Amino acid sequence: MPKPAKAKIDPRAAQADRVNGKFPVIRQGLHFLKQKWHKLTFFVFLFLIMAFLVDASISTMYDYWDVGSNSWFDRFRGDGEQFQRGAATVAQDQFGDQFLTVKYLKQGWKPSESMWFYNITQGSDLLPYDFFIALEKPGTSEPFRSNENMNFYRYLIQKPTRGNPDGLPVGFVKDTHYGKDYLGFTCAACHTSQLNYNGTGIRIDGGPSGADMDSFLEDLSKALSTTLNAKEKDKDAYARFVKNVMGRGNYASENDVAEDLKTFSQRMAMYNVVNRSATRYGYSRLDAFGRIYNRVLEHILSGEQLKEVLDDLASSGKLTQAEAEVILGKEVSSVLSGEQRDHIVEHVAQLLPRKAQLELRNQIFNPPNAPVSYPFLWDIPQHDYVQWNGIAANAGLGPIGRNAGEAIGVFANLDWSEKPGFSLSSLISGQGFKAQHISFRSSINVHNLRRIEDKLKSLKSPQWPGEILGQIDQKRRARGEALFANYCASCHAEIDRDDPHRRIVAHFSSVKDIGTDPKMAENGINYSGLSGILRNQYVSAGPGNVLINERAPVASLLTKATLSVVATPSGDKNFVRRAFDWADDLLAAFFSNDIKASMKEGNYAPDTTAEPFKSLLSYKARSLNGIWATAPYLHNGSVPTLYDLLLPKKQPGDPDNGEYRPSEFQVGSRQFEPDKVGLKSSGYTGFTFRTNLPGNSNAGHEFGTRDRKMPDGTIEPALTHEQRLDLLEYLKSL
C-alpha cells in the first residue's frame, strides 16, 4: 500500500507560527495592526497636517514680524507706522533732492506687509552675498553698497531692520540656494517708488521704480573686475576685500574667494556685453523683456547648436577653428551645465577680441533696445492681460509663469540638466514619455511668487495726498470729469479701488492706431532664437499649439521655459515640503485663480495660424487710478508729466510759439511738480532723455491734442489750455 504524500510546508508560514507561538505579544500586535491600520493611517496623516499647519503659522508670523524697526519687541507696540517702514532719509543728493521725513499713503498694506514685500526672496542670485557686502567702489575704500551710491542709482535706501539687518535698499535681499548665500532682487526693487515734495518723501508701494539698473549692473561689473585685477595692481585693496569676505565666515580659503571672484566677474562682464543697447536706458526704464529673452536663450542653447554657431564663425573667418575648439571644450553635453557655460564665457573673454565677441552675441542673442517704464502693480492680479503689449495672460498658470520669467531675468540660478527616463514634471511641461528628459530645477521660489501675487490683490492705488501736494480744485475736477468721459473713457475704464471684486479688462490698440513708439511691440513679435533643448516641443499660442523648430519666436521659447520651471519642484526643500508646496502652487493656480481665459478687447490685429503672435503688435490701455504717481508717461517713459502728455508732439510746419511735448529733458530727480503732475525735468544735470533716438519716440496717444476727424465725419476739437488744466485736476483724483 503506497505511503500517503507528505503535505508541503511553507517555511515562512512555519516560522511565523513558531514566532507567534513563542511570542503571543507579537501575534496580538500583528492582529491589532490588521484590524486598526486604517485608523493609524488616519491619525498619522492628521498629525502631519497639524504639524504642517503649525509650521506654516510660525513661518507666517516670522515673515510678518518686521514692522520697520530693528527690535523684536516693537511688533507688540502697534502696527509700526512710526518707524516709516525702515526708510532712510537724504539731506541732499547729486540732483539736489532732499527729504527729511517719509510719508506712506493708505494703499491697503500694513507696515509689516510692506516690509514682507520688500524682503521676500524670489530666488534671484546675482552674486555671492558676502561679495556685495565687502565690494568697494573702484579707486576708493567706499563700500559699493553705501547709501550714497545706492541712492545714486535711485534705489530706495533703508535703515537696518529685523528682516533686513544689513540695511540693504528696498528690493535687495539675501537668498540661499543649496546652502550658499547670494545677493538678489525682489519684486520691490523695480516696483516701489518715491516722490519728493517740500522735504517729504512720499513712498508708493507697487509704484514704478526710478532706478537705473543698467548703469548699476555695469558699475557692479567694473567693481568686480577692478577687485579681481587688484590682486596684481592694488594689493592692499585686494587684501582688504578678501579679509572682509573671509571675516563673514562663509569661505574656507582665500583660493575659494579668488575662484568665485573670477567666475562672477566674468559672468557679469559677459552679461553686459550680451545686453548692451545702442539706446541707453537711464533712470526709470529697463528693457526687461529683452534681457529675460536673452537669459532664456543662453540657458536653452544646446551644445550641438553652439558648435554649429562657432563653426559658422570659423568658416567666415571671424575666429579660427582652434579658437572654436578651445571655447567649446573637449566634451560638451546637449544641456550645458553651469560649469560648461563658465568655461565658455572664460575662453570667449580670453581668446576673442570685442568685435568677435559681438559677432558671437549677434548669432545667439537679440539686442535689448526697447526700454520701457517699470509697470505699476496695483490691480495687476485683477487684469485679464498684463505687460505693455499684453504678452502675459492672467488666467491659469499665467501669473506664476509671468513672475517666473521675471525671476529668470534677475539672475535666478538655472540648474537645468538632462536626466534619464521621465518625471511628472516633464510630463506636465510637455516632454512626454522619453528615454531622457530635461530637469528645469532652479533657484526660483515659485511658492513665494504665488504668495506675492496673492498679496498684490490687497494693494490699492495711491490717492492724491492733498495735505502734502495741495488740495484738488473741485470745480476744475468736475469739468475735467466730463472731458474724461468724452476723450479718455472709451479706452481707460474707471474702477472702484475699494471694490474687492473689481476686474479690469485691458483695452488694446494697434501700434498703427495709437502711434506710440513701436520698438517694444515689434521686438515682441520679430525676435527669434535658437531653440536648443526646447526643439520639437509644442507651446500654446493664440490660435493653437505651435511646434518649436530649430529657430523659433522668443515669445514661444519664454512661454515654454517658464512653464517648465513652474512645473518643476524646488530642489532646495525637503521632500515633504517640496511636494506640498509644488502641489499647492499648481492646484491653486488652476482652481483658485478667478481670472479665466478670454479674448483680448480692443482694436488690434488678432493672432492667426500664419502669425500666432500678431496681437502683440499693440499696446494696452489700463484704468488710470493712481496715474498721478507713475511719471514718466507713455510705455517708454518719453513724456515727463501728465500736462506734457496732453500736448502734441511738434511736427514739421507747426508754429514755433506753440506748446509741445519736450523733445529733450532730464531724468533722475524724484522732485514732484504738482502743477504739471510729474517729475522735475529741467534745472539740473541728470540723464538726458532724447526723443529722437530709436525706442525713445514721444509721438502718439495725441487724443485731444489736435483737432481730430471722427468716424462719423464730425470734428473732435483739441483741448484748450484751460480744458487741459481741468482734465489734469480730474486725473489727480483717480
Image (cartoon, rainbow, N blue to C red):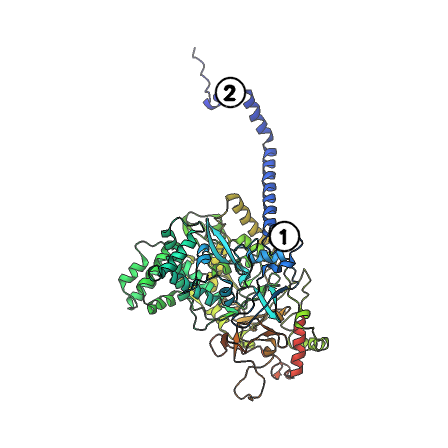
Q: Tell me the element at label 1.
A: helix
Q: Amino acid at mark 1?
A: Asp
Residue 222 — which label? none
Q: Which residue is mark 2?
A: 17
Residue ID at (42%, 58%): 299
Query: Nearer the observer, disc 2 or disc 1?
Result: 1
Q: Tell me the element at label 2.
A: helix
Q: Is residue 553 visible?
A: no
The quadrant in which residue 313 appears is: bottom left
Residue 74 — which label? 1
Q: Amino acid at mark 2?
A: Asp
Query: Which quadrant would the N terminus be assigned to in this image?
Result: top left
- Give the Cα distance between marks 2 and 1: 67 Å
Label whose residue precedes the other's in the sequence (2 or 1)? 2
The quadrant in which residue 276 appears is: bottom left
361 to the left or right of 457: left
> In this view of the protein, which residue sits in the foreground, 610 or 134?
134
> In this view of the protein, which residue sits in the foreground, 221 or 250?
250
Residue ID at (39%, 53%): 257
The quadrant in which residue 6 appears is: top left
655 over 505 or under it: above or below = below
Q: Is residue 476 visible?
A: yes
656 to the left or right of 300: right
Query: Which quadrant would the C terminus be assigned to in this image?
Result: bottom right
User: Is disc 2 surrounded by few (<14), some (14 to 19) or many (20+) residues within 10 Å?
Assistant: few
399 over 616 or under it: above or below = above
* Residue 415 rendering spot, x and y as whole percentages: 43, 53
* Residue 298 rendering spot, x and y as whole percentages: 41, 60
* Residue 211 rendering spot, x and y as whole percentages: 52, 67
